[in-house]
Image (cartoon, rainbow, N blue to C red):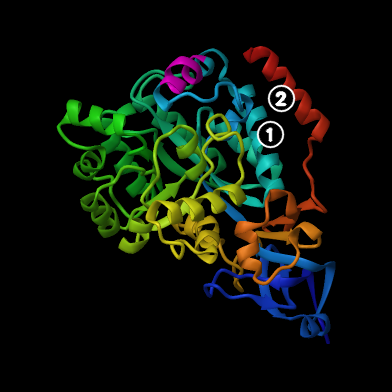
Amino acid sequence: MSATIDLLIHPRWLIPVVPDNVIKSRHSIAVHDGRIVDILPQSEARIRYQATENYELSEHALIPGLVNLHTHAAMNLMRGISDDLPLERWLRDVIWPTESKHASPAFVRDGTLLAAHEMLRGGITTCNDMYFFPDDATSAFAEAGMRAVIGLIVLGFPGVWASDVDDYLRKGLAVRDKWREHPLVSFAIAPHSPYAVPDAGLKRAACLAAELDLPIHIHVHETTDEINESLAAFGMRPIARLERLGLLVPNLIAVHSVHLDETELALLARRGCSVAHCPVSNMKLASGIAPIPAMLRHGINVGLGSDGAASNNRLDLFQEMRQAALLAKVGSLDASIVPAHAALRMATLGGACALGLDGMIGSLEIGKRADICAVAFDSPLMAPCFDPISHLIYVCDRHQVSHVWVDGRICVRNGKTLLQISDNELLALASLWQTRLV
């Protein structure tokens, strides 16, 4: 007698990420109550289970939902507002003045909805966000049905949302208390960067993260100017300062980490820290090429992030996977560095591990939540295919994503995002904010 479940998916290939570099041909995945309950050959699945929903994806690869380890979702409303500038000028002359004038609860909610639509459409089921007005960002992610880790941002100076470190933390913790029971929402302590938060604020952030068992999400070693300014102000590089203040802990997510020497790499590895690698943003802002081969050699966990749409222009982890692999190869002059399966792991399980969510997501395993992405291989542009993992990194882009499930609930079907808000409404919101920002 067959068991009744919610969902059966029958792809051509199932790529679980765990075990590494494994491809299961003609296997099905069974889902019930938002959880993966079985992975088995399709012939057996059709006998063993009776599903409410069945998806026959005969020319598709099934992978874990992608994890965007670093983004500023609301900045989708500033996509392309100022391009081709170095980071310091970009921030000082354009981004910060625009935020000071326009950032608001409505700005954050609308921008986050636009970003959630883009990420889901590209197979991203989880993101690690950092921005102002986190209550409104959380509301937008919840409405979209996307899994999100909400960064409770901390700055050492007044901003559009709070006045000082104490105010940022007080308001952030209130948001956490409000949303802490939501099944798709979790939180991180997010001091913006070592240069934007004083010692006392960084210490408080570290203590709170330890007390509440939350990740620490922070930009660090993004540019050489940041390092030189730290040397001038504190007599040490930012990583050394974070070590002195107690922030180099296993739940630290060091975003960018472009300029690291061997001592710093060894220290991050020894402390069990993770890195959010943002290759496209690093290239676009001319920040440099992160030493990913050296990080992997030291055993540092690496995930992939898009950064915000204002500094990347796309929230697209297929693009990030490809660029992470290619940059590592050209930077090291070693074509075997960061093979396709390693780039896929960064975009899935690497991000999940950094967020402490690897027991729930990041791979297709029995018992994990059903965050799943289907990629179509049914176009002549994709043929022939000798290795579907290689194809995912070097051939596919986000337009091949056909179906996406978060916690077992379908969010993208046949390439169409299933949100409460329509595409036309999203376009109207984007147009409205473009007029205001101009």
Q: Quadrant of residue 427?
A: top right
- Distance between the alpha carbons at the discs numbered 2 and 1: 8 Å
Look at the numbered discs 2 and 1 and tell me whether their residues touch, using CB distance below 8 Å. Answer: yes
Q: Position of residue 363 (x, y in %)?
A: 57, 66
Q: Is residue 386 above or below residue 326?
A: below
Q: Quadrant of residue 76?
A: top right
- x 60%, y 27%: residue: 108
The local secondary structure at tag 1 comes to helix
Amino acid type at circle 1 is: Leu
From the image, tell me which residue sits under label 2.
430
Amino acid type at circle 2 is: Ala
191 or 282: nearer the viewer: 282
Query: Is residue 369 something one can see in this rendering?
Result: no
Chief SS of the magenta region: helix
Residue 56 located left or right of residue 78: right
Query: Is residue 265 something one can see in this rendering?
Result: yes
- x 19%, y 26%: residue: 233
Task: For the C terminus, give its image quadrant.
Answer: top right
CA neighbours of label 2 inside 10 A, class few (<14), some (14 to 19), many (20+): some
Residue 284 located left or right of residue 370: left
Residue 228 located left or right of residue 63: left
From the image, tell me which residue sits under label 1.
114
Q: Position of residue 53 (x, y in %)?
A: 84, 65
Q: Position of residue 234 (x, y in %)?
A: 17, 30
87 or 191: nearer the viewer: 87
CA neighbours of label 1 inside 10 A, class few (<14), some (14 to 19), many (20+): many
Q: Which residues are magenta?
A: 89-97
**Residue, far left:** 235
Question: Is residue 4 shown in magenta?
Answer: no
